[in-house]
Amino acid sequence: MCDRSGFRYWREPLCVMAVVLYVANSVWWKPMTSDPTAFVHCYLGDVLCLPVCIPVTLWLQRKLCLRQHDRRPGLREIGLHWLLWTACFEWLGPRLPLLAPGAVSDPWDAVAYGAGGLLSAVVWRPEREPRPGATPSLSEVVGRATVAALVAGFVLSAYRFGIVFR
């Protein structure tokens, strides 16, 4: 019998579906929509950010032994990634034009990231986080935050080099 309680990281159905929607939006819906203020132009990619980036980031953290379990992400993990990536994408990115040319700060993007985070929390139904036997060390916390910031940096720089669809 298959154990469905473990988190499957980038193989999570929500992550896979978010990637498919992102690509469809980039190559099909945006070109078909002439209104530059339409949801598909401005916010759909932002809503999909956390469902795509959290599983990849947690997988990297697990592979680097910075995450000690394979449970679904808790509300705290989702919320902390939302805060970190909002700061990176809406504050840092616009201030580093060499990394992310054309990036602008839009508070509605933070709302869209939050909507994607809420969707993730509903779909992944995080279990109550057990009380850890030992709190994570400072180096583990810094390591996990560094991995998440590097993922944000990759996403920002991917636009510069045309790796990610616009």
Image: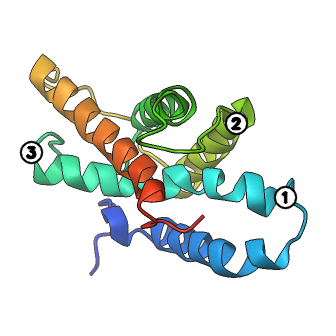
**Three-letter code, disc 2:** Val
Work out whether residue 27 can be spotted: yes
Q: Nearer the viewer, mark 1 or mark 2?
A: 1
Residue 11: name its quadrant: bottom left
Mark seen at residue 36: 1
* Residue in the image at 41% along x and 42% along y: 99
Q: Is residue 146 above or below residue 2?
A: above
164 vs 67, nearest the viewer: 164
SS under mark 1: loop
> Cβ–Cβ below 8 Å for labels 3 and 2?
no
Residue 164 in the image, given as x and y percentages of width and height = 48, 65
Work out whether residue 70 can be spotted: no
Crowding around mark 1 (Cα neighbors within 10 Å: few <14, some 14 to 19, many 20+) is few
SS under mark 3: loop
* Residue in the image at 51% along x and 49% along y: 50
Specify whether 24 is left or right of 42.
Answer: left
Q: Going from the N terminus, do you reach mark 1 or mark 2 first?
A: 1
**Three-letter code, disc 3:** Cys
Residue picked out by circle 2: 111
143 vs 162, nearest the viewer: 162
